[in-house]
Image (cartoon, helix red, strand yellow):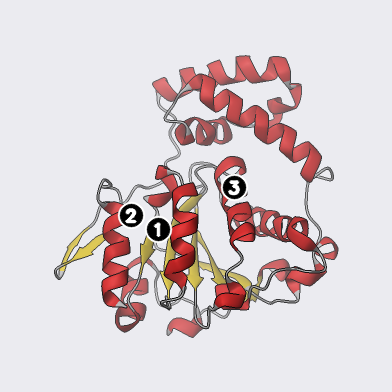
Amino acid sequence: MEGKIEAAEKELHNNNGLIKLQQQGQEIQSVHCDDATINEQEMNKISAVRAVVEKQDPSSKEFDDFAIRRFLRARDLDVDKASAMLLKYLKWKKSFVPNGYISPTEIPNEIAHNKMFLQGVDKLGRPIAVVFGGRHMPNKQGGLEEFKRFVVLALDKLCSRTSPGREKFVVIGDLQGFGYSNSDVRAYLGALSILQDCYPERLGKLIVVHVPYIFWTMWKLVYPFIDNNTKKKITFVENKRLTETLLEDIDESQLPDIYGGKMPLVPIHEA
């Protein structure tokens, strides 16, 4: 298992200097923090995106500068690509979330799985969610669309705990008990698409723990669809270093109690 985790870390991070690598007992760390100051270059590009997008969709006026900056950063500050991304998001939002939010009453089957929780913040003040992959089952009643609505509710809950200039969150993906019945590739690709296309630059870090061998088969299918910006934010943790590693990013008072901390978990729909 340790060999699998080391191989995955190398694959994810060989070309990335922004996150922590653990290799041969050495630790290299450089943390990319959110910032509340928009520099002149970004401000000029934000204005350019506004000029393009508002002509086609006036509702974009409600977006603040930080929101537009996220779309720009997701497209390496390319104005045309960021504008296209934002317009696509606005169209999706009107169609998929016409009321502006997802109600728990719209996702009863997903809530019944009791698989996602929210509580606490990391040392950078980013809210923490815990997702239990072993509790996810393909939704035969509500289908893929209900699962996607669940993802939107969860992401909106996380985003509501952020603030301008500190806009990211942390997810602990716990794969304890993960098996073939949980390998719902269509659902995971759907969640990935929503995260990357509709909530750009929101994920600060994804920490994957309790990784079983069976996971790597699904990982090979999903990995090609993960964009480079997202790959930089994923790290796998060895079981023997679980609590120790989590405490590097999360204070004990904020660490979920299931990992040796003091923070009780709250179901995402109740948070």
Residue type of the residue flagged with mark 3 = Ser
Question: Image quarter for residue 188?
Answer: bottom right
Question: Dot 2 lies on which element?
Answer: helix
Residue bearing mark 2: 12
Camera-side residue: 231 or 138? 138
Residue appearing at x 84%, y 45% in the figure: 99
Q: Which quadrant of the rendered structure holds the C terminus?
A: bottom right
Residue type of the residue flagged with mark 1 = Ile
Neighbour tally class for label 2: few under 14, some 14-19, many 20 plus, Cα within 10 Å: many
Q: Position of residue 125 (x, y in %)?
A: 46, 58
Mark 2 to mark 3 CA distance (whole Å): 19 Å
Neighbour tally class for label 3: few under 14, some 14-19, many 20 plus, Cα within 10 Å: some
Q: Is residue 111 positioned above or below 49 on the image?
A: below
Q: Position of residue 68 (x, y in %)?
A: 56, 31
Q: Which one is earlier in the sequence, the residue at label 1 or at label 2?
A: 2
Question: Dot 3 lies on which element?
Answer: helix
Residue bearing mark 1: 234
Numbered badge on residue 193: 3
Q: Are dots 1 and 2 in contact, CB under 8 Å?
A: yes
Question: Dot 1 lies on which element?
Answer: strand
Between marks 1 and 2 in the image, the one whose residue lies nearer the viewer: 2
Residue appearing at x 67%, y 53% in the figure: 156
